[in-house]
Amino acid sequence: MQNEDKTMSGLTGAIVMNIDERGQSEDDLRNSEERCRVFIELITEAIWRIEIEPPCPVDISEDEQIECLYRGGYIAECNEIMARMYGFESTGELVGTRVSDMMPRGEPENIAQLRAFIDSGYKLINSESFNLDKEGNTRIFSNNLTGIVENGHLHRVWGTQRDITERRRAQEAVRKSEERFRLLFEQMLDGFYMSTPDGKFVDINPALVKMFGYSSKEEMLRVDIPKELYFSVEERKSYVRDSGSEESDVYRMRRKDGTTIWVEEKGRYIRDSEGKVLFHEGILRDVTERKLAEEKLIESEKRYRFVAESMPEQVWTADAGGLVDYVNRRNIDYFHFPTESLPDAEWFNLIHPDDMEKTAEKWNHSLETGDDYEIEFRLKRWDGAYRWHLCRANAMRNQQGEIIKWFGTNTDIEDLKKAEERLHESETKLQQSQKLESVGRLAGGIAHDFNNMLTAINGYSDLTLRRLAGDDPLRANILEIRKAGERSAQLTQQLLAFSRRQVLKPEVIDLNEVIVDTSNMLQRLIGEDIQLITVLDPKLGRVKADPGQISQVIMNLAVNARDAMPDGGNLTIKTVDVEIDHDFEKRHIPAAPESYVMLEVSDTGTGMNPAIQKQIFEPFFTTKEVGKGTGLGLATVYGIVKQSGGHIQVRSEVEKGAVFGIYLPRIENKPEIDETRNSPGQSRPAGEKILLVEDEDMVRSLTVRILTESGYVVTAARNGVEALRICAEEDCGFDLLVTDVVMPQMGGRELAVRLSETLPGLKVLFTSGYTDDEVFREGITEIGTNFIQKPFAPDELVKKVGDILGVDKL
């Protein structure tokens, strides 16, 4: 550019010299001016001529000359390039413009340029000025100036200009950028360096000096980088790479005192046009603390993995968004996972469909709030079985409190769940038992008084019917009274049955025979639209139970089945021997391991939901309409089965029928034969003496009348104390003691024991409208099995007494 400026200056000088020639002819002068004009138009730079009017004396001071130039100078001539340079469309717009309008005095560079022009003898090369264009914008120009002096005055100035505004701005920007870079270079916290390919520092910043523990920049610049700072060249991969423009590595380096630091370097190679490496520059950051933290994290992770792999629970982790990224070996073995990383979709597919929604809602809530996660749900094991699990998860957070990881465990609680279910069932059964016990006490108390009244009602009805002729108009009334009494007695028996307070008459029986005997009655009971199917095991074992009560159980279950099949269906009665072991017990009924005979009654009816199944054995619970069920049927079944030492279990689903399984202990004895039924002809009564003890006046009077009319000699007492006094004061030669069990002052059991001490052969017949199992069963065991339940019919009492005494009174 300087050579170019000198050329233009020479050209201008030549033009001025040609114009200033003395002694030329007019033609030569015109030719010279024409050539000058051609040069002005053809040259690529701006050319101008300033005329000074009046001409400026050269012998005045600099300031006066500058004032003269500003005041008298104006553009007399210029080329098109200059016009365009200043934003004018033609030279005519620029010609006549005064110097003071183009070169503001306020710009120091302009005044300096004029002083340099005057000091140089009016010839100046490469000077700079700040001129205004047409719009008033300041632009920077490089000028070559030549002044024309005649007779001691400066008449005009020729010059060339080049617009260097953009170049100067670029240079200024570069300068400022270099200043900012230097400031950043000196103040940045990371170390910065520039080095040669052979490992010599060219430049470093203070942070690098401090990082490596040197006392000054000069001291560190003398360091041989590979030898003194790097542990090995191999560790610093980026330094020896020849390809790529930018690298980043983490490796160890050595400080001045020999200690080790970890650094992260990001650097690049500076190459020439042929690709040869000239320099390497890079930024080093001390990451020792981060590296140590990472190592601690790795060590912690190893310990965590060791603990996780040793735990019996299924351990898992998930990222902040909840995606599972690790499962321990227990998970892999339990679920047969192919890897320790498991997609969420596959994980959730293991959850039981019924638990999917609540599990997802709970997990999403924890992800949103960061709350601990705890829930129970079922997971599918590798063999396809669903088992209950307790899932817990906690969030790990960073210093800002943001969740960065989830740690969780799944614990198989299937056995615990089953234990809880068994405990719940036991508690439910205990509550049911306590409820039955309470209701039973109430029922027993009612039954005791009610049976005494029914004994009188039914007994006097029977006696009255004996005396009425068949066509007597009162006979129909008495028969209705008798029927009402029988129905009331049946209701009382049901109350005693479900409360397990009735007296059973257990025998060794074959359930198949009971079912066959009951079949005809069952078919009439269930109707023609229901098919009765029996599947009876011909090798069925024996049980000890009251056959009448077992028949009642079958009848009650059949009635329930009939009501559940309003449009018809199948009623199936099945018998089979079963062995109940511990596994069976867990799956079905809470019974000790034992041999049982199972009586199963199933139907194809409407079935029951779980809520109804939990209540079906409760007394007075019914799903039937008001007036169509007492709610005692299944409660009675439950009481009879339990009092017989058995268990009952129900399985049912809505619209899939119901199955009732009754398990009675199996025994090896053969069926018992009631010898009294088939005994040879009995003798007629011979005035046998009977001691009757009864606290209810109506029952006592009725019993005395029945027995007296049957030919017996009866002595009556109101209670046990009175009976003992009678025996003490009179001849106590009684053949039979007929006594109520529950009486004030002294009950029938105690009375029987005390009388048997003085009358070893005394026979006893117990009566009661209510029996307390614990007391009465003990008494029966000691004395005998003779018992008649109130309310009893006159003929039933007479037959029972006759059987005991061996007398036929009927």
Image: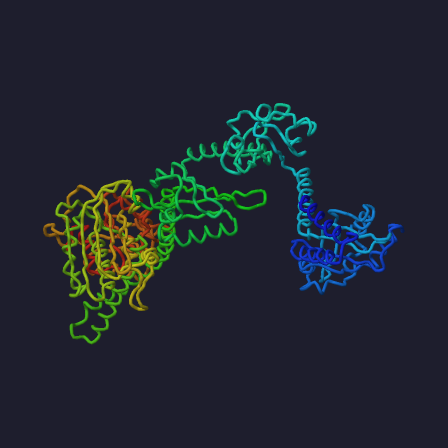
Q: Is residue 541 left or right of residue 307?
A: left
Give the image location of residue 301, x and y in percent: 48, 34
Q: Nearer the viewer, residue 805 or 249?
A: 249
How many numbered discs, if any? 0
Q: Nearer the viewer, residue 770 or 500?
A: 500
- Is 529 situated above or below 669? below
Q: Is residue 778 something that shows in the picture? A: no
Residue that protrudes farthest toward the right in the picture: 60
Residue that protrudes farthest toward the left in the picture: 680
Q: Is residue 365 something that shows in the picture? A: yes
Q: Is residue 407 left or right of residue 347?
A: right
Give the image location of residue 652, x and y in percent: 27, 56
Q: Image quadrant for the N terminus?
A: top right
Give the image location of residue 474, x and y in percent: 22, 74
Quarter of the figure with residue 658:
bottom left
Residue at image location 16% in from the left, 64% down from the top: 524
Residue that protrudes farthest toward the bottom in the picture: 473
Q: Is residue 786 left or right of residue 50?
A: left
Give the image location of residue 276, x and y in percent: 53, 34
Q: Nearer the viewer, residue 652 or 543?
A: 652
- Is 129 situated above or below 525? above
Q: Image quadrant for the C terminus?
A: bottom left
Q: Nearer the viewer, residue 794 or 597?
A: 597
Quarter of the figure with residue 280:
top right
Colour logic = rainbow
Residue at image location 82% in from the left, 47% down from the top: 121
